[in-house]
Amino acid sequence: MSLFDADLSDGAGAGAGASDASEAGTASRSASGFAALRDRRGGGPGVDRAAPLAARLRPRTLDEVVGQRHLLGPGSPLRRLVEGGATTSVVLWGPPGTGKTTLAHIVSRATGRRFRELSAVTAGVKDVRAVIDEARETLSTSGARTVLFIDEVHRFTRTQQDALLPSVERGWVTLVAATTENPFFSVVSPLLSRSLLLTLEPLTDDDIRGVLTRALRDPRGYDGRLSVSDEAREHVVRLAGGDARRALTTLEAGAEALLEAHECESGPGGKAGAGADAGADAEAFVNPRPRLDLDLLERAVNRAAVRYDRSGDQHYDVISAFIKSMRGGDVDAALHYLARMLEAGEDPRFVARRMIILASEDIGMADPGALGVAVAASQALEFVGLPEARLALAQAVIHLALAPKSNAVIRAIDAATSDVRAGRAGPVPAHLRDAHYRGARRVGHGAGYRYPHEAPGNVVRQQYPPDGLTSTDYYQPSGNGFERRAADRVHELRGVVRGDPPPSPGSSPPPSPPPSSPS
């Protein structure tokens, strides 16, 4: 018998009055759970009740920081900086929500230094110099040092960054500069050379789950007054995409929606005001804590849950469908799967790598520019990051899906590899061997080599492959796109180099090994 069933039996034996009292107690417990949740929005002593959840839960020590284990281990540069009180300036490079601002606060708090913060979005040279002058004066009068945190330092112009150099060089401030962009492109070299560069990694799914668990249990968060269904928790993890701030913001939106839904139901004419049914009373009795479920969370953040497991079947099924849609020329399906992966929090670098592979495997010389487009999209992703980089990825997807297709490249390299593995790898012809050392000619190396640039058309009759492979055709151009012209060129070159005309481009090529299994 369940706890609820036992209490219900006792209530029935005591008569209607006891039953009414039981129902009142159930409603009271349910209401008290929501009241407690409402009271804990800014929980914890010394915490601003109006502050966002992410601000209230900001780690105060290195031991509270989630993730970044490569930076936080014993003897690591960051831990030495915090625990040893060093004055080294730091550039923190990493995606949003990985702890850059948090680490700046920890450096200040742990070393007992004054903390000043500037945003490169709004601050100018005048603001920078004012903070530096204040820090310099404070250091000279009281000996107190200052940690200057500059968020999004990549937005500073070169002049603004140069204004920081004297203070960093002379130790007037300990600079902690945060950037989401590659500092080798966005931070001036003199400033970078005077700072310790630390790279922060996106948080793992387990890291994000740890952040959510702390938010639910910590007195500064919900202090155990709120529960979250497994489905809702995993939806938050997917939406976070390695960003702790986004995870906490999403959780907070869901908690606020839960409160609003309860207040609507408790008001005049609401379900609670009219009297909840027995099932609702039972749930409230067994679990008086407010519970955030997937349906309410989806409505709160206006984002439906994407059924996608980045380490399971969905991961492989969706990327497979993505590749095959581009290979098959269905641009709309390819864009759908791209959006699906990005919305589910898939690593965009993984997506970009697969596009680069497809550009050579399924397009190749039919559109030689396709590889450059895919590589450019990958570089754009590294340079600007999401969400803006979704445009470059989408542009590349459209190009790859619309491009003429050919698998001649993979067939060619697989055929050559098959011969090498079968032992068909004879000695390099003597006239092609390196002759740039004393005595090479005496052993015949380089003797008889014909320099193509001294011949008409810059091509000469000459043996290039080892003996036994002189008539082997690995590359068989398709008739698609640029390869229509490439086929004529291959036919022409083989005729000159081999000294006898090869089969015409339209003739049947010799059989070649099948390509590697496509993804």
Image (cartoon, grey):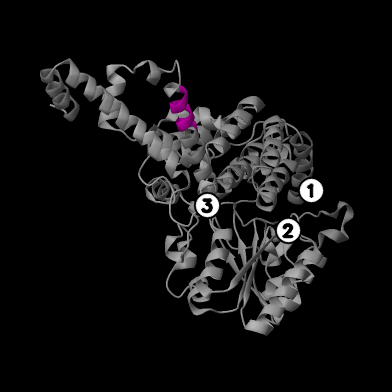
Amino acid carrying label 2: it is Ala
Verify whether residue 453 appears in magenta.
no
Q: Is residue 309 above or below residue 200?
A: above
Mark closer to the chain start, 3 or 1: 3
The tag on residue 48 is 3
Amino acid carrying label 3: it is Asp
Q: Which residue appears at 50% of the width and 45% of the height? A: 248
Q: Where is residue 383 in the image (x, y as percent from the top left)?
A: 69, 53
Q: Position of residue 21 (x, y in %)?
A: 22, 23
Q: Position of residue 414 (x, y in %)?
A: 56, 45
Q: Is residue 449 left or right of residue 55?
A: right
Verify whether residue 258 appears in magenta.
yes
Neighbour class for label 3 at 10 Å: few (<14), some, many (≥20)? some
The CA distance from mark 3 to mark 1 is: 81 Å
Amino acid carrying label 1: it is Val
**Circle 3 SS class:** loop
In front: mark 3 or mark 1? 3
Question: 382 or 268: nearer the eye?
Answer: 268
Q: Is residue 117 left or right of residue 300?
A: right
In front: mark 2 or mark 1? 2
Q: Which residue appears at 57% of the width and 34% of the height? A: 323
Q: Where is residue 131 in the image (x, y as percent from the top left)?
A: 72, 69
The residue indicated by pointer 1 is 496
> In the figure, residue 433 lies in which quadrant?
bottom right
* Bounds of the magenta segment: 257-264
Q: Give the prevailing secondary structure in the magenta stretch.
A: helix
The residue indicated by pointer 2 is 120
